[in-house]
Image (cartoon, rainbow, N blue to C red):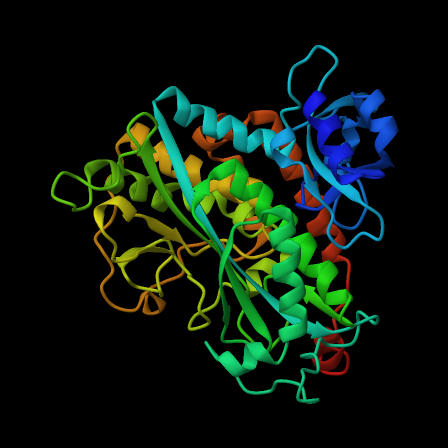
Amino acid sequence: MEFINGWFAERRITEVECLVPDMTGNARGKIIPASKFCKELGLRLPEQLFIQTVTGDWPDDENIVDPREIDMVLRPDTNTLRMVPWAADPTAQIIHDCFLRDGSPVDIAPREVLKRVLAQYEQRGWRPVVAPELEFFLVKRNTDPDYPLEPPIGRSGRPERARQSYGIDAVNEFDPLFEDIYDYCESQELDIDTLIHESGAAQMEINFLHGEALSLADQVFLFKRTVREAAMRHDMYATFMAKPLENEPGSAMHIHQSVVDATTGKNLFADENGAMSEYFRHFIGGLQRYLPAAMSFFAPNVNSYRRIARHESAPINADWGMDNRTVGLRVPFAPAHAMRVENRVAGADANPYLALAATLACGLLGCIERIEPRAEQKASAYELPFGLPRSLEESLRNLDECAPLQMLLGERFVRVYGAIKRKEYETFFRVISSWEREFLLLSV
């Protein structure tokens, strides 16, 4: 607490945003005066926070958590203390962990789920290293949900129409916005690296420097909030929907991952000759076997599955290949110390804590069970059959039938997550789309 007091005093902090990442990966919590925060550690929030759906509803079975709507005790993680760079007055933000009154962690909190998986690595003397790559679209302000999204107006005064993959001038169209994003990220010590224009109209990608999994999940969580805020200040939206535009590719969160010896730092994915190690093969084997069961964490929304399509820069199966962007599991050419696998399945709409927890859990199960991967895919994997679920409903069924993954992520968490996502699916299924009105109204 002494550290926080000093940090606040040095920066003349007047307000504090107390953040808790919810099940969708958005920020919940409280905003309180800095003076009150320093005096009253141990904020309270109801456990029901973690069972609210993306539409603000509740699962049909609310007894999946304590029906009394008990309070959780929030404890700040000082490693996450940062400024809110866009605030008018000096404002701090800090991510909190959630505990029950007996001091035990709330096991359905997404941050705790990731910690649970990382603890399994720690017990074995291993440490995951990850580097997310996050894609997103810039779009015009859209206040009518029935109206399709459109690319925003850039410096030229014209919207982007053609695809501009890796286009430098296309990125420069939005220079003022990206200057703000970089300034905001620097102020928050977010370790972003490369900015590129992706293949969609006004679709961008930001790469993060590799690092420890919990820290990177925190950074992705804060980055998405930062980009949305910066975009609105430039009269546009930034969206991390997996498939926001009908005729454009979807947005992914590619996850580069490796595992090192926690003591020596040696990359366990490479053997003495710099080739793929047995450990690495088993890690890939685990990803191949368990990705279909973990799919709802990589594709958590009904919209997510529109991205999983042939020839749309998104994988349709869990095959692996060297430097092959058509597979779900790409192994880039790299020296031994940087040997890694890129999980290309996750969408940009995934909760970063749960996506990292799920991919690391799948790989770990492969190492525990010594699962050998299928043969390397050396051609286009788009010509192969679909090997991943095609809907949220199918993904949740797969998760229900996978006891090893449930044990690793936490059985109560999986039960709660499934109830939330089924409620979201049922809410969506009640909506009658414009396609149905156009083609079925007078034709059936």
Name the foreground residue: 347 vs 423. 347
Establish if 205 lies above or below 397. below
User: Splitting the image into 4 quarters, where does residue 228 fall?
Assistant: bottom right
Question: Residue at 57% across / 57% down in the picture?
Answer: 348
Quadrant (top left/top right/bottom left/bottom right) for the C terminus = bottom right
Question: Residue at 67% across / 64% down in the picture?
Answer: 180
Name the foreground residue: 283 vs 443. 283
Q: Position of residue 379 (x, y in %)?
A: 25, 68
- As drawn, the residue found furthest toward the left would be 273
- Asked whether the viewer can see residue 397, the reply is no
Question: Residue at 70% across / 80% down in the picture?
Answer: 439
Quadrant (top left/top right/bottom left/bottom right) for the N terminus = top right
Q: Position of residue 272 (x, y in %)?
A: 13, 38
Question: Residue at 72% across / 28% down in the picture?
Answer: 6
- Asked whether the viewer can see residue 80, the reply is yes
Name the foreground residue: 384 vs 174. 174
**Is residue 323 found left or right of 223 in the rendered image?**
left
